[in-house]
Image: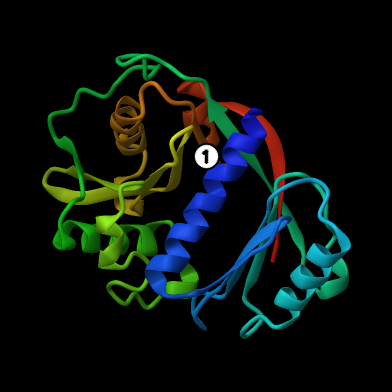
Amino acid sequence: MSPLLLANRNAAALWTALAQARGNELVQRPGFVGVRGSERGGTRILLLGPDPDEGDLAALTELVRSRRDGKVVVEDQFGTVDMGDLGLTPRRLPVMIRDTAPQGSAGGTSPSSSAMEVVRAESPGLLETVERVVAHGFPLNGFLPWHPGEVFPRTMLERQDVEFFLITRDGVPAGACMVILDGAVGGVYWVTTLPEHRSRGVGRALMHVVLERLSGFPVTLTAATAGKPLYDSLGFDVITQATWWS
């Protein structure tokens, strides 16, 4: 399977997992997966290939038109659709992948500060902390003010394909992320450092632990502008520029 299809399949696994945990309506068609979320979460659509048929395009259009309060994101990694006629505007974000690497080869220089500790969030309390960090630090503006359990419900701890990581600095929560492992590739999402902890190596320390956890698998993510230099240094390569319509 091509790197782009690996990344796309992982993103579909992410939105499926979130829809199921949040109790959202999940729309699954050959050409796209859609999530009709809450009023705060909005609607999310991910194209699954470069050639959606007329039925897929009609269903996608209807899903966009029926969005709640105008909140919608259509992620197109293939450069297929034009949502301008539906009142959406595009932005471009790089989809990146890191080839399979053996354990101990995270790349770059691993931060050695004893002030930082990365743990896997496996309890409801730690999951709530991860959720708070991501909601405020990423930020997830649609979910602010933050309500515990709305972004990452506790039932996500029961899933074998989902993991959460929290990093503390001097004992204080400093960053977090979510990981999806779908059997063929690991996907890293919402890599977050809180503003007061930025430029201290928090993101790098967090990613080193995540990459060690995913050793033996290719790893994919979508990079924000600020994070791309870190991912470049860790061995990630750009495979496409995805268009996000909103």
Instruction: Report the label total.
Output: 1
Residue 245, image quadrant: bottom right
Q: Within 10 Å of the Cα at label 1, are there few (<14), some (14-19), or many (20+) other Cα atoms?
A: many
Judge whether residue 104 can be spotted in this image: yes
Q: Quadrant of the C terminus?
A: bottom right
Horizontal and vertical percent position of residue 6: 58, 35
> Would you identify the image quadrant in which residue 213 lies?
top left
- Tell me: 120 left or right of 203: left
Q: Is residue 85 above or below residue 124?
A: below
Q: Secondary structure at mark 1?
A: strand
Q: Which residue is mark 1?
A: 221
Which amino acid does the dot numbered 1 rest on? Answer: Leu
Q: Is residue 54 above or below residue 163?
A: below
- Residue at image position (16%, 51%) is 172
Q: Position of residue 197 (x, y in %)?
A: 29, 46
Q: How is the image coloured?
A: rainbow
Q: Residue at x 71, y 40 (%)?
A: 241
